[in-house]
Amino acid sequence: MRITDIKVHQPVGLLRLQTDTELEGWCLGVSPEVATHVQSSCREVLIGRDPLDRERHWQELVRLDRFRYLPHTVRGLVDVALWDLVGKAVELPVWRLLGGFRDRLPAYKSGGNLDQVAAFVDDAVQAREEGFFGYKDHCYRGPVVMAAVARQARAAVGTDFRLMHDAVQTYTYAEALRVGRVLEEEGYYWFEEPLRDYDLMGLKRLASALDVPIAATEYLPGTVYSTAQVLAQQAVDIVRASVPWRGGITDMVKIARLAESFGVQCEITSVGAMHGFVHAQVLAAIRNCTFFETWRVGSMGGEPLVRNPLEVRQGYVAVPTGPGLGVDLDWAEVERQTQSVT
């Protein structure tokens, strides 16, 4: 089997790796900018090549990142389509190709930066009532507000429900230390992005000073290579990874395996590409990730393009079992929404 063409449907954002067989590899979420880079730079790496040589393609795409100044999202989305294609070729879901570990994933609810302390508390209570196994706020309204959120949310949900705080890299070191002390008192499961990812010394000091685990690297360039430096310096307690922010499926698995060798959790960030299908495949193949991150019960979206959307039911996400990513596209709907194909 050889890759014969690359097509991108817009504004659908569907990347198709076509072959000399009836099989194709797909990835949704490709912007016009990324599509331009894919067509101008990635064709030389992929056209005429065997998609089963996935590691070789990843290494060549990493090299192109530097020589063509490509956004890392380009490699990530192409890598997703390659994995989808390989899974279809061997008639297995990607998570089994990666080494199956589990077939359903516990989920937590990820909330926003809400207006009032009471709104955060209500959101956490609702998450528990909806069956989620935890709740993460994205409060970046300052240490005073966050301290109130932590105390009131814990009182409202009880001690056996996991709470996490994501500061989105907004604190100074002194502020992060102050908030972290409160999170420790309230038994928070982790403290995410307290400082900028590049502030390795600050993160290391904070991780040493606090008992609540520090999570970072969500948007750190360099994927597995930069994560290796963070882990080697013991700058954080938990690393983060996702598609396409930190590369593709290959990147995520390399990061997760690296973290596991250090005895560190790799918590996957957000629903991710392809309306949760990509992250579900990776989480199902690794041990050192506790939760699937999403924002609501029921469907994760993609309709009407996706006929079998992933859903959160009773706190769990069932892992797709179809070949590749397991996405069932409605081709009539793809054609209806397509305005151009490049």
Image (spheres, rainbow, N blue to C red):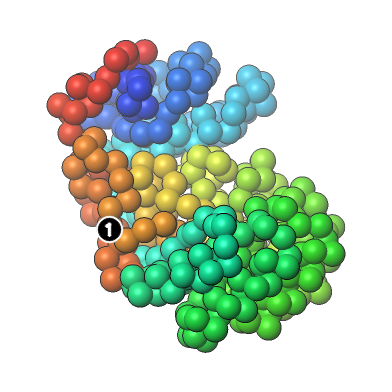
Q: Quarter holding the C terminus?
A: top left
| Residue at 24% over, 35% down | 305
Write down the quadrant of residue 207 in the picture: bottom right
Q: Is residue 231 left or right of residue 323?
A: right
Residue 173 placement (x, y as % from top left)? 83, 61
| Residue at 30% over, 46% down | 301
- Residue 56 in sight here: no
- Residue 116 in sight here: yes
Write down the quadrant of residue 202 in the picture: bottom right
Q: Is residue 229 left or right of residue 239?
A: right
| Residue at 27% over, 58% down | 298
Which residue, given by chain and number where applicable, does mark 1 sit on?
298
**Disc 1 residue type?**
Gly
Q: Is residue 23 left or right of residue 79?
A: left
> Callout 1: helix, strand or loop?
strand
| Residue at 49% over, 85% down | 158
Q: Is residue 239 left or right of residue 32?
A: right
Q: Nearer the viewer, residue 18 or 190?
A: 190
Q: Quarter holding the N terminus?
A: top left
Residue 28 placement (x, y as % from top left)? 36, 34
Q: Nearer the viewer, residue 180 or 204?
A: 180
Residue 127 drawn above or below residue 157: above
